[in-house]
Image: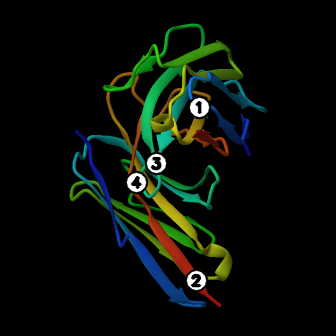
Amino acid sequence: GAVVSQHPSWVICKSGTSVKIECRSLDFQATTMFWYRQFPKQSLMLMATSNEGSKATYEQGVEKDKFLINHASLTLSTLTVTSAHPEDSSFYICSAIGQLNSNQPQHFGDGTRLSIL
Amino acid sequence: KQEVTQIPAALSVPEGENLVLNCSFTDSAIYNLQWFRQDPGKGLTSLLLIQSSQREQTSGRLNASLDKSSGRSTLYIAASQPGDSATYLCAVMRSGAGSYQLTFGKGTKLSVIP
């Protein structure tokens, strides 16, 4: 089946640090990737939709200057949390979709647990 | 705004029992509904995807139904096993040009007792 790799799986860093998370589709070309955030015992909340070669579309309430998304190729999207603070600590998950149609399931990475001290 | 609710929030059953997880959504304008499994600290594994025009999908011991008009879906797990213990998430893909975005419920945490 389709595989999405997310790296790193766990990050602990000091407040003010910028953190980059990578999301790769290993065996298919991902025209669209999605970035989600999940707080403990909460549902996954969509942060942004990333299309290859164009600017990401951010959900309401998500700061685009805080969460920088780059989707430079059909197999790689990155999320950079700039100047991270403790309130940014969360579980970040990416997903990827190949063909843009409703028959295709989204394939999810294993997530990145971000802890800001 | 689409809202997805899952009941119960947690469920504990003895091994071998059949069980049903429930999902409801407020906006019936959907492309599809997906059920996922999430193990602690892990990403999501897709279990079943039901198109809006379909009534049910089956995979092994899992059967998912969809009643789009009433905004409900159920996930039926037959002969539960300890390995089924995980959080089960329901998500709907909203319809509309170019969206393909998923709205998730909070999940049902399932514990199957050996």
How many circles with numbers are drawn on the protein? Answer: 4
Find disc 3 in the rendering and name its residue: A39
What amino acid is labelled 4 in the image? Answer: Gln
For numbered disc 1, what is the local secondary structure?
strand
Which of the two discs, 3 and 4, sits closer to the camera? 3
Q: Residues within 10 Å of mark 4 (few under 14, many from 20)?
A: few
Image x and y of residue B90, in percent: 43, 56
Q: Which mark is residue B112?
A: 2
Relative to residue A85, is residue A22 drawn left or right?
Answer: right
Determine the image quadrant of residue B100: top left
Q: Are marks 3 and 2 on the same chain?
A: no
- Mark 4–mark 1 distance (CA, rounded to whole Å): 21 Å
Q: Residues within 10 Å of mark 1 (few under 14, many from 20)?
A: many
Find disc 4 in the rendering and name its residue: B54
Figure quadrant of the N terminus of chain B: top left
Name the chain under label 4: B
Find disc 1 in the rendering and name its residue: A97
